[in-house]
Amino acid sequence: MRANPPRPTDAELEILCVLWSRGPSTVRDVHEVIAARKPTQYTTVLKQLQVMSEKGLVRRDESQRSHVYQAARPRDWTRQQLAGDLLQRAFEGSTGSLVMGALSVQKTSKRELAELRRVLDEYEKGLK
Amino acid sequence: MRANPPRPTDAELEILCVLWSRGPSTVRDVHEVIAARKPTQYTTVLKQLQVMSEKGLVRRDESQRSHVYQAARPRDWTRQQLAGDLLQRAFEGSTGSLVMGALSVQKTSKRELAELRRVLDEYEKGLK
DNA sequence: ATCATACTACGATGATACTCGTACGTCAAG
DNA sequence: CTTGACGTACGAGTATCATCGTAGTATGAT
């Protein structure tokens, strides 16, 4: 149970996504979702969640026979960490470059572009 | 020398950044830059570069006694890969969320915001 | 020729990630 | 009370990452 959790690994992030979308879940719940995409043993997910609990990435409620796990940090907070981390490691802190990179890899529709402008406006409003 | 190189690890990315900024470099060149930030042995950088060469992340010119390394892929291409990868793994492919995350972690100035709008405009122009 | 310097090659080590099998406990139905 | 279904705990195997020490080779200066 470390105080501030480390950057989640690939497998851990996949599990976190499930928890974020489903809310508090049992191992069985998570396993069903994961195994649907890629053949995975139940105990693999279990072990993963135990480790994640150790790291402080998830919280565990043991009051039930089937323990219930939930993400320790909200989705947007974690996303922010990951974006900031990549920003530092690969983009020299240049937000513009990151945005450009994201735009060019994913075909972004006109609608989404408008949405992005709205995001910028909103952000600027909260700035001053 | 794998055909399409895998996602670079943290240490590898750090070295790639040096190569991108310096251009073709010897191990010594790279080591000097790396060691300035964090105490690191020469042979660590050497080994790293050998492995990266094996993976196809860098190319090696052995014609000189001191081998000369250069990044196998251009900076922007790699950045795009990384952004796209994160986009898929953590942001459900939503560019808007990624941008939002990037904005909120790094204090972005008004000037940069204007720059970002320009980036959006330019991207849209090339779209239709 | 000898010697110090600079360079590459490579094995070893410890840490972490990921996966799975096995052991074991609990509980309800028969 | 036995059995089967379901749950957790945990050790172990394999792979990758990151770091470094040692060995050996080439080069240039004395």
Image (tube, coloured by chain):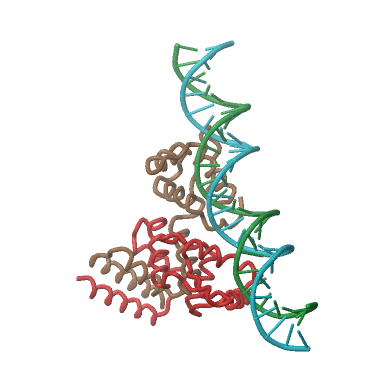
Chain colours: A red, B brown, C cyan, D green
Q: Is residue A80 left or right of residue A19?
A: left
Q: Residue at x 50, y 71 (%)?
A: A60
Q: Residue at x 32, y 73 (%)?
A: B121
Judging depth in this view, the residue of C11 and B26 nearest the camera is C11
x and y, in percent, of residue A21 in the image? 49, 79
Name the quadrant containing residue A90: bottom left
x and y, in percent, of residue A22 in the image? 50, 80
Q: Is residue A74 left or right of residue C1?
A: left
Is B117 placed above or below B54 here?
Answer: below
Q: Is residue D13 left or right of residue A99?
A: right
Q: Residue at x 44, y 47 (%)?
A: B19
> Which of the image's four quarters has the C terminus of chain B?
bottom left
Q: Residue at x 54, y 62 (%)?
A: A51
Name the quadrant containing residue A35: bottom right
Judging depth in this view, the residue of B109 and A110 nearest the camera is B109
Is B75 placed above or below B37 here?
Answer: below
x and y, in percent, of residue A77 in the image? 39, 69
